[in-house]
Amino acid sequence: MILLSTVITSMEKELWAFFSTEAHPDMYRYINSAVNYIYNRRDWQWNRTIYSFSYLSANTEQTLPFFATKIFRAKYNSALIDVLNNEEWFLADDHTNAIGVFWDKFIATATGTYQILYAKPAPSVQSWDTYIDLPDFYIDALQAIAIHYAYKDIKDYSSASALIWQANAILDNVTERTVDTYPRKVTRLWSNHSF
């Protein structure tokens, strides 16, 4: 969890004159855009969550408490099942081993307990003293991306592109650390230097 006030302090230091005049109302927009950028950059493991619920009325749409932008897996009574979108549900002849999820609507042919593994949508920042639902090691990337959007607003494109490049490098480095946890095997060069 990242405390928003630390991000704001960093932005104030980088954008001191701009922050004090015209950008202050847009700080939420910059930070929310940066959070969205990170959430949508890839399918992060930390962003996956499970929603379990009981489905009581077969072939009836039930509203989910979230918008399902990305669903990874689904289970029905502990067995894996297929997840179909609106068009696939409409075209399929057999729905026995599948569920339909259309944004925040859920439909199935059998009642019972369902579990959905999905990507959480990016949270919206509304207050200065809140925490942002991101792992702590993303703070540098979050600050760089937020400042990047501020620089784009004042048309300082060279600074903006340098910061987005830096943020992408940070995010790619984090991805390597979280995906490739074993050290790479590097072959050593032969070290016998005889002349």
Image (tube, rainbow, N blue to C red):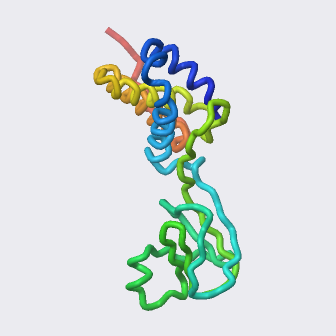
Residue 135 falls in which quadrant of the image? top right
Q: Position of residue 71 (x, y in %)?
A: 52, 64
Q: In the visual, does 159 lie left or right of 89? A: left
Q: Position of residue 160 (x, y in %)?
A: 34, 25
Can residue 147 be seen from the camera position used here? yes
Q: What residue is at 49 percent from the left and 66 percent from the top?
A: 103
Q: What residue is at 62 percent from the left and 41 percent from the top?
A: 133
Q: Quadrant of the N terminus?
A: top right
Residue 107 versus residue 167 in the image, above or below: below
Q: In the visual, does 159 lie left or right of 26? A: left
Residue 165 falls in which quadrant of the image? top left
Q: Quadrant of the C terminus?
A: top left
Q: In the visual, does 76 lie left or right of 178? A: right
In depth, the one of 152 and 1 nearer the eye is 152
Residue 87 versus residue 121 in the image, above or below: below
Q: Position of residue 38 (x, y in %)?
A: 48, 40
Q: What residue is at 53 percent from the left and 47 percent from the top?
A: 122
Q: What residue is at 61 percent from the left and 30 percent from the top?
A: 4
Q: In the visual, does 44 lie left or right of 23? A: right
> In this figure, what is the number of numbered marks?
0
Q: Position of residue 53 (x, y in %)?
A: 69, 71
In depth, the one of 166 and 24 nearer the eye is 24
